[in-house]
Each structure stands twice: as structure tokens, then as C-alpha cells.
Image (cartoon, rainbow, N blue to C red):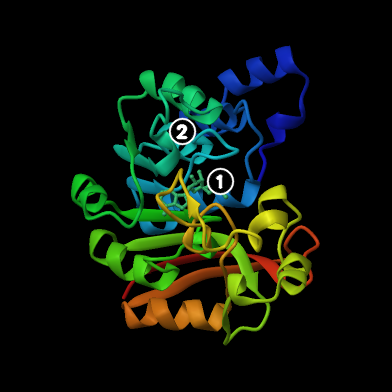
Amino acid sequence: MRSIVDHVPDPLRDRLAASLPTRVRRRVASRQSPVPLDAQKLELIDLAVDRLDCTSFADLGGLWGVSGGYSVYAATAHDTHRVVLVDDDLHDRGGCATADARVVRQRAAGLPNLELLAGTMGEQRVREAIGHVDCVLFFDVLMHQVAPDWDELLAMWAPHTRAFAIVHPTWDRSEEVVRLTDLERHEYLRLVPSLPLHDDLHHHLDEENPRRGRTWRDAHDVWQWGIGDRALGDRLADLRFRTRLYADHGSWNGLPRFRKTVLLASRD
Ligand SMILES: C[S@@+](CC[C@H](N)C(=O)[O-])C[C@H]1O[C@@H](n2cnc3c(N)ncnc32)[C@H](O)[C@@H]1O
């Protein structure tokens, strides 16, 4: 959902934007993020606010490739009192921050309602630090999660929120959950995005990934799961979360078995 003022040339756009109501102006400003953001993820944040009155968010795994852009958006486009960005890559390793971490630290410095929390989403310390938020965002992260697995993570976070906003590549067989890394290499490579990390994976599955302190087989750097819609919906229902909104946006980047889906669920 893009605003009409996004399509107007710059000086005129600024004048127009300034004349807009605060709420719309913030949305426009947030869409001018230094990195491109996905319109459907932004819209899902808007819907969590508008339909479920969410004013606090945890953005789990919100760093890579978007520099915490969805957290910044949630913190600036609405009257949100608290947003926490959690990411393992907010840890400086070897004294070095990633480029994404540097960008979001700069942006967060001016936003008192945005907190940055280095850690993994499975850690109890992280959940305790967050306490309760109205909505937990899982944007393109569930398919990476092992030990705790994606469904265990949902169960861990359920007591800490009343809504889940999920955008991810969904396995196209609704009832199935497939552990992708158990597949033969050629089949794995046929199904997942073409990346150097994926290409090498089967040559060192049981070697340690030093960055994560676990084997590559269990590391979140690579695609781990195909999660069908029904399997996800059943897991949410077990946790007493009902799907309020669902959309299927078609093939995920042309992959043969994954579709891009958007889901907002809230506690019964
Ligand atoms: C594919 S990127 C998704 C980024 C963003 N949410 C988006 O929608 O574009 C996955 C991000 O999640 C982080 N991540 C994945 N698993 C994690 C975990 N278990 N704990 C903390 N961070 C994790 C990675 O470091 C990375 O920044």
C-alpha cells in the first residue's frame, strides 16, 4: 500500500507531505527508508495498529538487508510507545558491527521508543527483557529457525504477546512441514534461493558455524523449513491465536514450491 505522494517529484512531494495529517506524513517519511522495504510488511504493521490497536512491537530478526527498517517504521509511522528490534547480528563480532547494525544504531539514536536488543529469539533473557508487547513480527524468519524450531518459538513468544504478524515463504503443500536440510543436495538447491551459502551447505552440514556456535545443520543463516499454511494455522490455533487476516501473494521470488503469504493472528 503506497501513498499517492510517493509518486510526486521531490520538492512538490515535500510540500504535499508537509500538508498531510501527521499520521500520513509519518508513513510517507518512513517509506523513504535508505533501504527498500516490502509494502506488504509495512501494510501488515499498519493493520496491526489499525485493526488490533497495537502500540508496542517486537521485530524478531529484523536486521539483515533492511537495517531494522520495519522496526523504524513501526516506531515512526504510528503512535507506537515501544518497539524492540531483536537480532543475533546486533552483536558486534570481533569488534565489528555489520553495515545494517551501524545504520539502525544511527537511526535509533533519534528514536526513544526504539530499543535494539542483541540476542537470539530463542533466549529466555531476550523474552524477559521484552516482557510483553502487543504484536510480535516474524518477517522472513520462521523458515530459518532450528533448536528452538519455528513452532517452539511461537509457543515461547505466545505468552509475551496478543498478536503475531507473519510474512514468509510458505510451503505450497498446506499440511506439510519439511525439514529442507534433510533433503538431498540437488533437491535442496532446486527448492531454495540460489545463494553461495546454500550452494556450499551440504559439504559442511555437521561442521561448526563459528558465528552461531552450532553446526551449519542447525544454523539460522540458511533456509531450514518448508512450513505449510495449515501446519502454521494449526500451531497458532493450539496456542489460542486466531487468524484475522491472510493473503497469498503468489510465488515467492519464482521458487517452485514457496509462496509469499501474509498473516495476522491474535489471541482468541
Ligand atoms: C532473512 S533476514 C529477515 C530480515 C527482515 N526481518 C526482513 O523481513 O527483511 C533474517 C534476520 O533474522 C536474524 N535471525 C534469524 N534467526 C534468528 C534468531 N534465532 N535469533 C536472532 N536473530 C535471528 C538474522 O540475523 C537476520 O537479520
Say which quadrant the C terminus sits in.
bottom left
214 and 81: which is toward the camera: 214
- Give me the residue at 46% from left, 25% from top: 97
Mark 1 lies on residue: 42
Mark 2 lies on residue: 72
- Give me the residue at 31% from left, 70% from top: 155
SS of the residue under disc 1: helix
* Residue 11, visible in the rendered structure: yes
Q: Amino acid at mark 1?
A: Leu
> Where residue 237 is drawn, which disc sits there?
none
Q: Examine the rendered structure and indicate whether residue 106 appears above or below residue 7.
A: above
* Residue 47, visible in the rendered structure: no
- Image location of residue 182, percent across then percent down: 59, 76
The residue positioned farthest toward the top in the image shown: 11
Picture quadrant of residue 33 = top right
What's the CA distance linking mark 1 and mark 2?
A: 11 Å
- Give me the residue at 50% from left, 82% from top: 231
SS of the residue under disc 2: helix
- Image location of residue 219, percent across then percent down: 49, 57
